[in-house]
Image (spheres, rainbow, N blue to C red):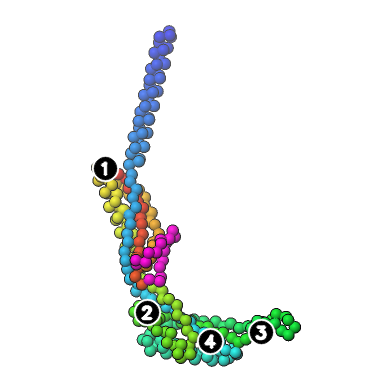
Amino acid sequence: MDMNKQWTFWAALVLAIAFVLGIWIAGSTYLSVRKQRIVSVTGNAEQDFESDLIVWSASFRVQRATLSEAYTEIERERTVVQDYLQRSGLKPDGYSFGSLDVSQNYSSGYDTHGNYQQVPNGYVLTQSVTITSGDLDGVEELSKSISSLISQGVEITSQAPAYYYTNLDDLKHQMLRQASEDALDRAEEIASGSRGKVGKLQNASMGVFQIVGKNAGEDYSWGGAFNTSSRQKTISVTVRATYALR
């Protein structure tokens, strides 16, 4: 083979390789562009709702010199509290008394020799009562007036009521649907602006539920918020979705 034929052969080979590489690069670029035709959006849903269950607790305590005296007094006060709750319209299954907490008091001081000592100085008995009801107005009024038992010798302390919603799971499902629909609407708005259409859903993930007091100005929490101190609440959730574009 002379030099001209060798040069022609190698030139043809180089051109063939370049042609194949060009087709491969063009195909890869086309697939890459096709693969990148997606849109990622975040849908949001928010709704106000009112609690339908209230849980309220109070506790009362007695202090006496002997344990038997303390037991006698705590039983009397438990009866006073129970009568008060029943007169307020609560049924026996609407409240429950907690277990009795017993502790011993000590007086600290020094003996005649200057030694530090603790001497038993009576007993303290504490008991709690918890009311669970769907009558939010009634229990709220009860929690405000319970201090009237002090005049009957009951040393009672009231806690702030806690509010819950019994259909919360159903509400969460509803919020997820709304957030997903909002995500799709946003994707379609973006696609229409670029003369495209939304294709199949590629992936989706939900955020955490944020349940805060309505108009309370509470901060959202990274792990989700769950307010129990407000009767009126606001629930919100986000859904992040990625769609293919056609």
Mark nearer the N terminus (2 vs 3): 3
Q: Report x, y in % for residue 172.
A: 35, 63
Q: Which tag is nearer the camera, tag 2 or tag 1?
A: 2
Which residue is label 2 attached to? 140
Closest to the observer, 132 or 60: 60
Disc 4 vs disc 2: Cβ atoms closer than 8 Å? no
Magenta residue span: 214-230
Task: State the residue at coordinates (30%, 59%).
Answer: 178
Mark nearer the N terminus (4 vs 1): 4
Q: Secondary structure at mark 2?
A: helix
Q: Report x, y in % for residue 22.
A: 37, 27
Disc 1 vs disc 3: Cβ atoms closer than 8 Å? no
Q: Which tag is nearer the camera, tag 4 or tag 1?
A: 4
Q: Report x, y in % for residue 70.
A: 56, 89
Which residue is label 1 attached to? 194
Kindly identify the amino acid type of the residue bearing the numbered disc 4: Val
Q: CA distance from mark 1 to mark 3?
A: 84 Å
Which residue is label 4 attached to? 62
Q: Secondary structure at mark 1?
A: loop
Mark nearer the N terminus (1 vs 3): 3
Closest to the observer, 172 or 72: 72
Kindly identify the amino acid type of the residue bearing the numbered disc 3: Val
Mark 3, Cα crowd under 10 Å, few <14 / some 14-19 / many 20+, is: few
State yes or no: residue 224 in magenta: yes
Mark 2, Cα crowd under 10 Å, few <14 / some 14-19 / many 20+, is: some
Q: Secondary structure at mark 4?
A: strand
Q: CA distance from mark 3 to mark 4?
A: 19 Å
Quarter residue 212 falls in: bottom left
Closest to the observer, 11 or 215: 215
Q: Which mark is residue 119?
A: 3
